[in-house]
């Protein structure tokens, strides 16, 4: 199917586009406002705002979206997603199941039998079933991984859904993704890693959105979830949850100058990783990210977990899950996490100190935190509670944010984010 350009579909845009007030100003031409987080540094972030008419597209299926992305080219482009686009489809638009991707004799039951730790041991899986898994995974990756190049804006029209896709912004600059419901980046072929975490674990391949080696990126009014295949309904193998989803939005491999605003992260285990390794590997001095006015709802951990970066987290709303909760703010190697005026809502069984987890971290700046409607001093409570098991964190993260919009009280942000975060809520 060919890509349909705006000029071709002008007569039917009334059925597809966002509400009249948004369409009148054409949100696809919006650029990041001045001082709106790290992505506004320098020349700012404009995405595909400079695109000519020949590079403005409305897409309604995977084939059209892939064609519009043009292999991740740097040509200025605006891509408007209409309806539901399913990445797990062939070029004729027919849905592809996990069974359709399986090849070379891959079979989950045989895979489990082959690599059962009781007989296989702790060695990395190898042999026929692991080779078949890799071949099957490659077939799925060919369909669901969609590369986003520089100077690109992707926006969802009213009710737009991108399902099963791994939007990968790789080694790109100047990208905007807005007003999109991105859900269920489902991995059909997780790999067993015997030595992960001491007990082994299942590793999945896809984030809903992955920023890797990219800079000047604005993600705004996006909804990210596992909707369709929640991991809590998956079975347990080898005593570990058979997770099918990786991150909702990961920012790694030296990515830099990113603003994530007014977005909704929902019903997920590991939501956001900033910095992918405890070794610097080019991350030192990068990974500068701003998170503001986002909602993290029923997120178990990584909201976010930070390595190396100078990360400003302000005016976010956290609705902490009741089951399996681990933490929200992860403080890792050489991180400079600066938290201001965030609101947490929990049940009584969750303590203030549970909101933070440290791995080789040394510092956390926190102010204005609201916990179940009451102001709390998060850092000293965390230090007092964990003094016997983890080293104390200091308040000096080595930097002070200057690029930010108006910082509201946590109480006001809690109300505003509940009403305004997520796809379909651009004012």
Image (tube, grey):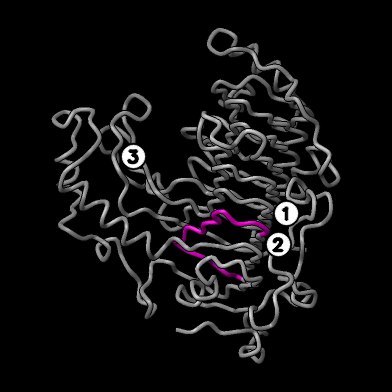
Residue 67 percent coordinates (x, y): 50, 75
The answer to which of 126 and 294 lies nearer the viewer is 126
- In the image, residue 418 above or below residue 302: below
| Residue at 62% from the left image edge and 31% from the top image edge | 308
The magenta segment is: 159-174
Q: Which numbered disc covers residue 425?
A: 2
Mark 3 and mark 2: span between their CA atoms? 35 Å
Question: What number is the disc on residue 419?
Answer: 1
Disc 1 + disc 2, Cβ < 8 Å: yes
Give the mark, 1 or 3, whose residue is nearer the N terminus. Answer: 3
Q: Nearer the viewer, residue 27 or 128?
A: 128
Q: Residue at x 51, y 65 (%)?
A: 162
- Expressed as whole percent of the image width and height from the top left, the position of residue 140 reads 34, 61
Mark 1 closeness class: few <14, some 14–19, many ≥20 residues within 10 Å: few
**Circle 1 SS class:** helix
Foreground: disc 1 or disc 3: 3
Q: Which mark is residue 70?
A: none
Going from N to C along the chain, the mark reached first, 1 or 2, is 1
């Amino acid at each position: 199917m060919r890509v349909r350009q705006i000029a071709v579909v002008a007569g039917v845009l009334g059925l597809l586009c966002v509400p009249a007030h948004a369409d009148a100003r054409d949100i696809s031409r919006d650029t990041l406002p001045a001082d709106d987080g790290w992505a506004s540094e320098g020349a700012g972030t404009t995405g595909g705002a400079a695109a000519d008419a020949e590079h403005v597209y409305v897409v309604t299926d995977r084939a059209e979206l892939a064609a519009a992305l043009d292999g991740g080219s740097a040509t200025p482009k605006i891509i408007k997603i209409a309806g539901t686009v399913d990445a797990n489809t062939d070029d004729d638009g027919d849905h592809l199941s996990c069974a359709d991707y399986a090849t070379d004799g891959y079979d989950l039951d045989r895979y489990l039998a082959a690599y059962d730790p009781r007989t296989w041991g702790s060695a990395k899986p190898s042999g026929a079933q692991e080779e078949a898994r890799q071949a099957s995974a490659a077939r799925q990756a060919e369909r669901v991984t969609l590369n986003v190049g520089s100077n690109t804006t992707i926006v969802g029209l009213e009710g737009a859904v991108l399902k099963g896709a791994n939007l990968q912004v790789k080694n790109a600059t100047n990208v905007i993704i807005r007003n999109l419901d991105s859900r269920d980046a489902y991995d059909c072929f997780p790999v067993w890693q015997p030595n992960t975490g001491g007990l082994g674990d299942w590793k999945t391949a896809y984030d809903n959105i992955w920023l890797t080696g990219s800079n000047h990126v604005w993600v705004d009014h996006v909804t990210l979830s596992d909707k369709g295949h929640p991991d809590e309904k998956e079975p347990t193998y080898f005593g570990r949850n058979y997770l099918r989803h990786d991150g909702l939005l990961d920012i790694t491999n030296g990515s830099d100058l990113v603003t994530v605003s007014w977005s909704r992260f929902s019903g997920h285990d590991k939501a956001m990783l900033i910095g992918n390794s405890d070794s610097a590997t080019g991350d030192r001095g990068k990974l500068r990210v701003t998170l503001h006015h986002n909602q993290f709802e029923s997120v178990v951990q990584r909201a976010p977990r930070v390595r190396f970066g100078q990360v400003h987290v302000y005016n976010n709303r956290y609705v902490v899950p009741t089951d399996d909760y681990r933490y929200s703010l992860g403080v890792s190697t050489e991180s400079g996490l600066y938290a201001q005026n965030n609101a947490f809502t929990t049940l009584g069984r969750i303590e203030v100190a549970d909101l933070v987890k440290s791995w080789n971290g040394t510092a956390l700046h926190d102010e204005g935190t609201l916990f179940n409607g009451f102001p709390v001093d998060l850092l000293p409570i965390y230090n007092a509670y964990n003094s016997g098991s983890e080293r104390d964190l200091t308040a000096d993260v080595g930097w002070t944010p200057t690029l930010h919009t108006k910082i509201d009280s946590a109480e006001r942000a809690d109300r505003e984010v509940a009403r305004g975060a997520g796809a379909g809520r651009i004012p």
